[in-house]
Image (cartoon, rainbow, N blue to C red):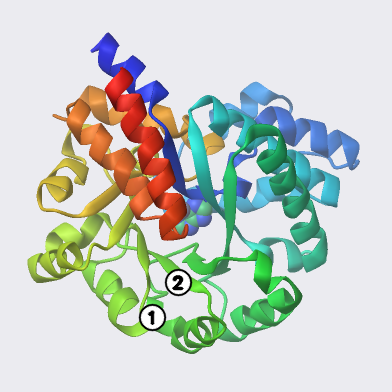
Amino acid sequence: MNNLIKFIEGLPKAELHLHIEGSLEPELMFELAKRNNITLPFKDIESVKSAYKFNNLQEFLDIYYQGANVLRTEEDFCDLAMAYFYRAHRDNVVHTEIFFDPQTHTDRGIPFNVVMNGLLAGIAKAESELGMSVQLIMCFLRHLDEESAFATLRMAEPFLDKITGVGLDSSEVGNPPSKFRHVFAEARKKGLKLVAHAGEEGAASYIKEALDILGIDRIDHGNRITEDHLLLTKAARSAMALTMCPLSNQKLQVVPDLRNHPLPYLLRHGLRVTINSDDPAYFGGYVNDNYKALAKYCDLKADDFIEIARNSFLGSFLPDQTVSAYLDVLDKYVDSF
Ligand code: ADE
Ligand code: ZN
């Protein structure tokens, strides 16, 4: 087991499901609150951490949106991003595709370009200092209406060459993918990649809608695809990637006992599953902690983790040549271990 843990830690990998706002550690939250003269509803870091107990997705989202309130300036967004990149780099993440939620910020008066410029400054630093590759995915909040998503897409217009794709997150049940069919069609016309959270709390029919109506390129979570065998086999045949997040699933009571996590079953059924951290500051672990949690609770061997790491590159939005180069790095690591 110890050898497997070491092997996992050193595996070169990509992270494809990470909300940058969900990487805001309590320590940085306090630092930014002080910098921006904001009074937090917590007296210290320990009381923040003890508030992180969730019965469902909504209980988490309420706290997560509140936490984001300390982010005000370009420097704040840059510091937030850099803290994540340094941490991910330690986990041997060589490529990452990060989500950001512009509406969480623009709705409280932070201009879109403050968010973008801050994140882009962080990304430039990660690329030059750490040698990582980074892509940005702009998520629409699904509890808001489609018009608000359109307004966000219009704000993003000057930055579209810096944004790889759009996604869909926030409260899933009651906000099906079809609610956003027009804005996703518009994003596709602009050449953006499409992803959506689906089948985290929502039924398999939400995954089907995301695939058939939105035409997504990748599924975020997708746990409940196990409930529709036809959909599962179709997704496997089309090499559709799933960005799964075990510790998130455990903390949000999607899969309270990780021994029941669907990832091994989906892997055996040929799905392109990947392991990611979602909102690591809130769920108690970065990407390697997520790999290790499945190593501990599920019947997965070194070969399975190699396949999962391969999937992380194959499921990425990198050009084919870059994917091949990363797969070579992965193969060299496996050979030399
Ligand atoms: N926003 C941040 N994390 C999320 C998750 N796990 N599901 C839906 N929306 C989110
Ligand atoms: Zn997520």
Q: Where's residue 334, x and y in %? A: 29, 26
User: Closest to the observer: 156 or 280?
Assistant: 156
In the picture, the quarter occupied by the C terminus is top left
Q: Which mark is residue 214?
A: 1
Left/right placement of residue 143 relative to residue 4 reads right
Three-letter amino acid code at the position of disc 1: Leu
| Gap in angstroms between the C-alphas marked 2 and 1 | 8 Å
Q: Residue furthest top?
A: 2
Please, what secondary structure does the residue beneath circle 2 have? Answer: strand
Q: Where's residue 212, x and y in %? A: 28, 81
User: Closest to the observer: 323 or 32?
Assistant: 323
Q: Badge 2, how many Cα within 10 Å: few under 14, some, many 20+?
A: many
Question: Which residue does the numbered mark 2 point to in the structure image?
Answer: 194
Q: Where's residue 333, x and y in %? A: 36, 26
Residue at position x 21%, y 41% from top?
261
Which of the 4 image quadrants contains residue 199? bottom left
- Kindly tell me whether residue 189 is visible in this rendering: yes
Indicate which disc, 2 or 1, sits on the residue closer to the N terminus.
2
Q: Where's residue 280, x and y in %? A: 51, 37
| Residue 282 against residue 144 in the figure, above or below | above
